[in-house]
Amino acid sequence: MKLIMAVVQDQDSNKLSHALIDHQFRATKLASTGGFLKAGNTTFMIGVEDDRVQDALEIIKKNCQSREQVAPPVSPMGGNVDAYVPYPVEVPVGGATIFVLPVEQFHQF
């Protein structure tokens, strides 16, 4: 058994949740916040039998799209002024960051 932890953008959360349910995957959704853009994310925790891991990964890949987003300038408080960019920058966001972890035991009470 594996535990898939998938961090996805909030914009993809509902679409992914419905797709997982349609394919009989049960998941727990957690609200999370990204470190770079300080934007809302959703972290899915999905318990999966070993033979269904690839199916789950394909569903996540299909439903979580990468997109461009404008990041506002960040002031160089205490940092290197040479690295300061005084104008907004487009950065790629979205998609999914996925961790697949082995599960030693699983209990449901």
Image (cartoon, grey):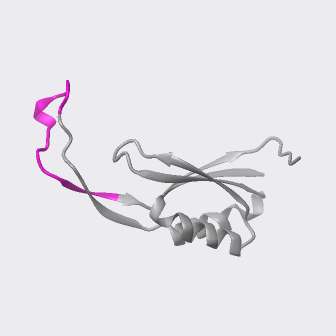
Q: Is residue 83 magenta?
A: yes
Q: Position of residue 18 (x, y in %)?
A: 63, 72
Magenta range is 76-92
Q: Position of residue 65 (x, y in %)?
A: 44, 68
For this orientation, the residue located farthest to the bottom is 22
For this orientation, the residue located farthest to the right is 109
Q: Is residue 23 magenta?
A: no
Q: Quadrant of residue 105?
A: top right
Q: Above or below — where is 76 with respect to 5?
A: above
Residue at 19% across, 28% down: 77
Q: Position of residue 46 (x, y in %)?
A: 69, 55
Q: Quadrant of residue 20?
A: bottom right
Q: Position of residue 48 (x, y in %)?
A: 74, 57
Toward the viewer: 109 or 61?
109
In the picture provided, is 29 more to the left or to the right than 109?
Answer: left
For this orientation, the residue located farthest to the top is 78
In the picture provided, is 47 more to the left or to the right than 84?
Answer: right
Q: Quadrant of residue 66?
A: bottom left
